[in-house]
Amino acid sequence: MLEIAIKGSKKYWIWLVVLCAVIGAGVLVYVDQFINGLMTTALSRDVSWGFYIANFTYLVGVAAGGVMVVIPFYLHNYERFHRITILGEFLAVAAIVMCLLFIIVDLGQPIRMLNVIFYPSPKSMLFWDMCVLNGYLFLNIVIGWKVLEAERNQIKPPAWTTPLIYLSIPFAIGIHTVTAYLYCGLPGRGYWLTAILAPRFLASAFAAGPAVLLLLCYLVRKVTKFDPGWEAMQTLAKIVCYALIANLFFFFCEIFVTYYSQIPGHMSHIDYLFFGLHGHNTMVPWMWTSMILMIAAAIMLVIPALRSNYTLLPYICGMVVIGTWIDKSLGIIAGGFVPSPLHHVTEYMPTIKEIMISLGIYGTGLLILTILYKLATRVKEEVRG
Amino acid sequence: MKKSRRSFLKVAGVSALGIGVAPALKAVATASASTPSAAVRTKAPEALEAKRWGMVIDTSKITDEIAEKIVLACHKSNNVPDFNHEPDKEKYPNTRPVNHKQELKWIWEEHFNNAFPDKEDDFLANKFKNLPFLVTCNQCKNPPCVRVCPTRATFKREDGIVMMDFHRCIGCRFCMAACPYGARSFNYRDPKPFIAKIDPAFPTRSKGVVEKCNLCAPRLAKGLQPACVEVSEGAITVGDLEDPNSEVRQLLGEKYSIRRKQELGTEPSVYYIM
Amino acid sequence: MSKNAIMAGLAIFVIAVLSPFWFNLGGTDAAPEPELSAKAKAAEKCVLDKYDMRANHMSLLDEWRDAVVRDADRKYHAVNGKEFQMSLSTGEDSCLGCHDNKENFCDRCHDYTSVDPYCWECHTTPKEINQ
């Protein structure tokens, strides 16, 4: 089936070359980081996780969001999603690959990364994260491939894919819950030590994932002959709407608990994010932008006339993606590490080198996504004639 | 044609796996066979031992000079890099400029409000307003950093010291996020250019691993006191918390002491006599 | 794919895959001979016998590391009766305590076999300290 990916239009090949250039630049900068250490980043003794882990957290959410198309179709036979489940599964594959790459570039000693397998530590959430991420990746590759192949040959997928599909659903919830558990079990970090972090992560994921998928549906409609279906896209928009409202509600719960209880250890982090602390206020414009974008997007999605507006919807999705990205990645990391456990404020903004490596990883994800979507759309075009 | 190419690839893949497994199995077999079974590994006879190592810092005996001496002694004896040190231009040409936010420190001074943020007080006793408080790894009895390490590169030894295995550490920095006391530092770059004089009794670290105070475990194993204790002029005492006759227990029995962030349940082993 | 393209691709692949050999063409070096320092010769007996050490010093060092760091054991009572400190580089009865010239001993075999152990990134050699 892969031979489909090497037959494409001129625009397709130009896009692939551009992606390879971005990836190449990222690799070159990574070589510098590999040789000289993470000193090329803006990470510090106080803020020891940064842009890489931030993007990792966001992309785990996008990958988990794929389950929002799998559950309706496979569990409840929601026919409208029949054509786009493969798009959701392939998006999950690309997202998980990016997650794993972000972890690898963040390690101080990446050549020792197999130590996590040689010395399994079941008490550590990172161990379980490795298990569920790789498991989910494997599941989605196998399921997506087999189902697509079956569709191409116009037969039913083999019977053993069904239990795997059912298994991928708890795995999807699992990957993002475990990622949240990385953060919310740490006693010294007031911003993260809350039971609502895992539900908030999931809500944000179920808004971000389908929003990305919606944008990809628009793109697929434009550049291929495959039409995911406007009804399916409308349902996706409704899912984004409710998940986004849930995310905002959970965040307001957090705000209430923090500010009504007036506990300084918890307030200081949200003060830093939204109002600045001791004169340090780099994050303030970002967080308010994120809130405004998310609230505005939620309102627009609730109004049916705006939600079903074909031209407006992609912009609303863009607002959702940007808003949830800021909140989930920069917000979570900066809020957790600032102020430090000794109440010092050390700010963090990524360096150019960090950004270039991250762009290289996004390029890799887009490359995988392009190739997989090319397969999926081409097969569906073939089958439909 | 398609079918046979696919089955060829399947067979090739399985054989590659099989061929790959064989030497791994062989290595495991020979490794266990070649271990000299008669060799014995023991502790050195002069090693200091304890059931649970702890530290008592008598804050009334700490002055600014003593605090500075302690920090210097610790960092010197453990080859902790000092970013204020100019690297030798001949040995280390082209070292990039330092980022002081990426500094490493095993023990350092803090004000009361930073060392004990849960006890911030507008009406703090005058004595403590400008006193230097030395903070370091608390060698917790219930350490969150050990719980989160995915490779058990940081682990709690039987004698209570929370150790680092620098060979196993993958540099994920999860332990740094987990520590409620900010006790850990990461080697964002090769530390060697910033070590003025390498102490031969202890290895340096490489870039990419986390480090922290290890209660001078190598010195304890040779029967020596930790470096901080030696220069503290009696301000710091290290001993066995579970031995009722040890000096640390006597100090704790006589005077009131506090620990950092006690409500978190980490059970720190470093006590501050107030 | 035309036959010429396939043959050309194959030829390029074979040349690329054999590139390490092209780089090392031009005579072989003699077998490596690590030099025993005076201290080592005087000590006569090492931790294990010569052939055992040559084959297994890597796993021995691995076990020593776990014993020292994780179990707090530091003394090694060898089968031949001698006692050693389980240390690569610190102290008189560590490895480098006797074999104090890394360049003439350790590096001889390592350079010949193109082995680049990163032990030396942390375990400082006596020469480095005295410099």
Image: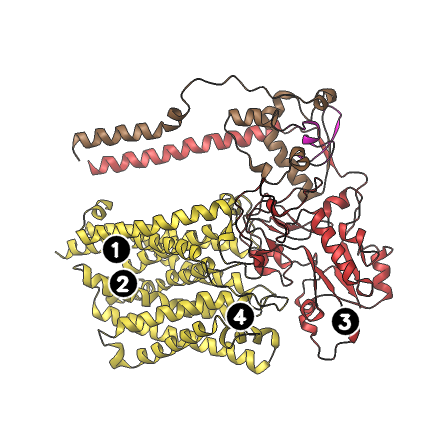
From what the image shows, is residue C38 above or below residue A288? above
Callout 4: chain? A
Q: Residues within 10 Å of mark 3 (few under 14, many from 20)?
A: some
Above or below residue B5? Residue A8 is: below
Chain letter, disc 2 residue: A
Give the side of residue B13 with respect to residue B133, left or right: left
Instruction: Tell me, yes or no, whether the two marked residues, 2 and 1, touch with CB atoms within 8 Å.
Output: yes
In this figure, which residue is indicated by the disc labeled 2?
A: A216
Whether residue A163 is visible here, answered yes or no, is: no
Provide the chain ID for the residue under circle 3: B
Q: Is residue A363 left or right of residue C28?
A: left
Residue toward you, A341 or A126: A341
What is the C-alpha distance between the residues marked 2 and 1? 10 Å
Q: Secondary structure at mark 2?
A: helix
Magenta-span inclusion, residue C84? yes
Tell me where residue C11 sits by quadrant: top left
